[in-house]
Amino acid sequence: MKKERTLAEPFRIKMVEPLRMTSESYRDGVLREAGYNPFLLKSDDVYIDLLTDSGTGAMSDRQWAGVMVGDESYAGARSWQHLESVVKELTGMPYILPTHQGRAAERILYGLIGGKNKVFLSNTHFDTTRANIEFTGAQAIDLPAAEAADTQSDFPFKGNMDLLKMEREIINRGSENIAAVIMTITNNSAGGQPVSMENMRAVRALCSAHKLMLVVDGCRMAENSYFIRHREPAYANKSYEAIAREVNAMADVFIMSAKKDGLVNIGGVLAMKSEQLYRQCTNLLIISEGFTTYGGLAGRDMEAMAIGLREVFDPDYLHYRIRSTMYLGEQLRAKGVPVLWPVGGHAVYVDAKKLYSNIPVEQFPGQVLVCDLYLKGGIRCVEVGSVMFGKYDKNNCLIPAQHELVRLAVPRRVYTQSHIDYVVDVFDDILELTDKTNGYRIVEEPPFLRHFTARFEKI
Ligand SMILES: *Cc1c(COP(=O)(O)O)cnc(C)c1O
């Protein structure tokens, strides 16, 4: 077989940020000081940071030029008009509000339409989405497609909504109790898996039949468009932007953290079709975020976001983006590392329970892998397993999470192919450790979202 040509980046480097190289014994010391929780490490001690793809991307020279011409007027700023026109075009919606990040838009929207006895249905609620919904007293129900349960099958759209379950929930609960249906695109909490146009259309039809509000959480709408174009034959000749417009046009409300496909380090968007809802959202925005033409952002942030929302649809960029994430997954799989399949848009997930099969889940195999990757290679990533989602029964026994995964999230336009090859190489060292039998115990944990600040001890 002919070797595939190296995937070279469709950009060159104009400014560099030096990275500090550290030794394994140095990392051993700082990891112990951080209580074996890489969230508590200093970023200066990290070589390749795959903790998250949120707000960690690199801006282009055009975006930095936009920063310089940002209009900092309190009201009616030029940069706001630029952002508004781009979002109007992408969503087809007449009412647009800026927010400082995604969860601010969520708090405003779900604060208004949520409340006790209300129910939200989603292909999978992202954790801030769920938190904002549950904070209002409402219930958030995940209805991921059945195909998503098999982590090794090739099913192309594992981010889809389960349509039969959705219909059943609507009928059982009564459509008047359902505040909204939320389609998260791509499906972040389900491995960054895409949603098909066909599934979107069916969800829209069900929402229309039962008069339900449809919200699109489009944080990664460009990445999703890439998958639709390459996996749904009818879309093979459509532009990525046209595909995103078609998806967004089906929604009543569009919500987005621009820290993902906005290609900026901070920012969010809330867009809608209803004037009445817009008036209500405006009131809350002014109380908490700021006036309607800046919403917690500087003019320069909005300028960079407007430019980023166009750049993200560049075919060369998107091909590089999706292929480079896939490359990491393919290389790891070829080495025999158990990887969630197919690879999603923004991250590669490793099945740590399979990799460290001798470590009991009570000793957190995912946390072991996270620590070993830091120790061996200075790579930082996050456990998505029983540290993050585990619960305890009344005898204080762990009720483990469904999977013990480790997420390697890939920041946009930050690391080169050789950085990724380096990560792949570090897994050679990891594979030598997999007959380990001991993991970690938690020695200190907060009551909520413990994965951020918990401390561990080696067993
Ligand atoms: C990141 C994210 C959010 C929240 O956005 P922030 O900017 O982090 O507040 C909401 N939904 C999804 C799908 C996300 O990935």
Image: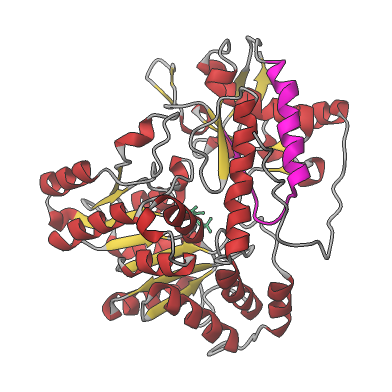
Please tell me which residue lies in front, 269 or 88: 88
Determine if the magenta segment contains residue 443.
Answer: no
**11 sits to left or right of 25:** left
Query: How many numbered dots are placed on residues in this image?
Result: 0
| Quarter occupied by residue 271 | bottom left
Vertically, is 13 above or below 27? below
- Whether residue 440 is visible, yes or no, is yes
Please state the horizontal and vertical placement of residue 355, each as a whole percent of the image: 59, 19
Vertically, is 268 above or below 186? below
Please tell me which residue lies in front, 296 or 224: 224
Which stretch did the figure color magenta? 406-433
| Quarter occupied by residue 66 | bottom right
Please tell me which residue lies in front, 425 or 26: 425
Please state the horizontal and vertical placement of residue 202, each as a whole percent of the image: 23, 55
The quadrant in which the C terminus is found is: top right
Protein image colouring? secondary structure
Vertically, is 60 above or below 143? below
**46 sits to left or right of 359:** right
The residue sitting at 55% across, 70% down in the picture is 309
The residue sitting at 34% across, 56% down in the picture is 197
Determine if the magenta segment contains residue 431.
Answer: yes
Please state the horizontal and vertical placement of residue 185, each as a whole percent of the image: 42, 54
- Whether residue 138 is visible, yes or no, is no
